[in-house]
Amino acid sequence: MKRNLAVVGVQWGDEGKGKIVDILSEEFDCVARYQGGHNAGHTVSFANRRYVLHLIPSGIFHPNVTCVIGSGVVFDPLAFLEESEAIGQALSINVAGRLFISNRCHLILPYHRILEAAIEKQLGERRIGTTSRGIGPAYEDKMGRRGLRVCDLMDAETLRDKIQVLVADKNRTLQALNYPQTIDPGPIYDSYAQYAEKIRGFVTDTSVLLNEMIRQGKQILFEGAQGTLLDIDHGTFPFVTSSSAAAGGAATGLGISPKHVHSVIGISKAYTTRVGSGPFPTEAVDSAGDEISTRGNGFGPKTEPPRRCGWFDGPAARYAAMINALDSIAVTKIDVLDTFAEIPICVEYKYKGSVLREFPADTVILSDTQPVYKTMRGWQTSIAGVKEWSKLPVAAQDYLKFMSDYLETPVTMVSTGASRDETIRL
Ligand code: GDP
Ligand code: IMO
Ligand code: MG
């Protein structure tokens, strides 16, 4: 029987999901993104080129793979058009005909970004440190049952009125936030009416499409963005994103039954990073943290905000393994740890002198936990680009075996570099 697979981040995002989804895509007929928006940045590297995808599923580089942007995604049409154009030009491929956008996706409009900036400013020290893409306010409008969807965009006659009503409402909110300007709905309508014509050919009822593929026995990979600890329900609330990043989001975000999600692979870095604010028990605020940061992010786009870096957080990953019922794990970026003589792994949290049995819901408690570390032996040799398990130094094998034993989950892939081929399959 064909098996559908969900790919989820185990940590706070940027685990290397893009790379792993690209590799796994070869074995699937379809890759479907189920949540988030262009807050995601999924890097895929091959043939000495590097592509960063935001909205387009990471299966797009395989010409036989159908790609779907599901209804759980909040959709910024301009971001989509820029991205699809860039990918099309860079690869001389036509994405039309194998890339589909759900007609039920909620839209991000310019006022969502303005609102987000105003709210973050008002929060001051308590700000989330969002990606400023309008993600949170767009999901707020969805849950508040007033958002505009892609299907609204397809109906030019009523679109102007709908935008006018919503903008009037946003202007009242912005006034309350002391925002100095009012938004004019006219230019928003003009630009969105143009985007509508450009995306029309991609828009369809993607749940019909996916369910038909399932009926035909085709194999689908469900691509999660962000990570379990950024999930709106299960993450480190309020320092989370506004969508269901964990595997449960695949069903609601795509309009398929949970019965069709057959297995789940979790992607985890061999250490931990986080962007934005919020608790991070294993953060290394010393020279080791700087070293991980330089080695791990040194090659990233300069426009990206800095990542906070630290050691592998066992209790957090074990919690994510439970939430997603992980069948397997892909461990990425283990080469980043090459230079360390000793590598701490957090195996327990202590709070006020006692061991915490469960990952705390309260971020105040999480901020005050003391990580208890087990010290692993480092390998102090370059494992960058290693493609076989047997070529890994024993200390690196031991590190991975420990992660697997601790999480009671097999490690089935190990990534030793950004490129597609710098991967060990087990
Ligand atoms: P995603 O959001 O989970 O898809 O991850 P990102 O693409 O945002 O971040 C992962 C970063 O690490 C990217 O720059 C990748 O090219 C890079 N990367 C992925 N796997 C590896 C690896 O095994 N080793 C190293 N050194 N870099 C990697
Ligand atoms: P990928 O898919 C890392 C973080 C932001 C912020 C919080 C809320 O590349 O792993 P948002 O703009 O979503 O309202 O911001 O979530 N965040 C990410 N961190 N990787 C991501 O995506 C992220 N998407 C959002 O930094 O702390
Ligand atoms: Mg990313």
Image (spheres, rainbow, N blue to C red):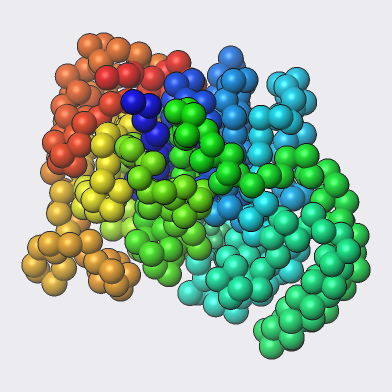
Judged left or right of residue 67, residue 151 is right
Residue 412 x %, y %: 28, 26
For the N terminus, give its image quadrant: top left
Which residue is found at the position 15% from the left and 49% from the top?
Answer: 347
Residue plotted at (26% across, 46% down): 325
Q: Is residue 148 left or right of residue 254?
A: right
Seen at 43% across and 69% down, the residue is: 238
Q: Is residue 375 above or below residue 238?
A: above
Residue 338 at x, y percent in the picture = 31, 26
Residue 36 position (above or below residue 92): below
Quadrant of the frame with the C terminus: top left
**Could you say which quadrant of the image residue 179 lies in?**
bottom right
Across the whole image, how many numbered discs are drawn on residues? 0
State whether residue 25 appears in this view. Answer: no
Residue 150 drawn at (x, y percent): 71, 55
Say which residue appears at 68% left-offset and 44% top-offset.
204
Quadrant of the rendered structure where residue 382 is? top left
Residue at the far bottom: name it. 176
Where is 185 relative to 307, above or below?
A: below
Of 7 and 352, nearer the camera is 7
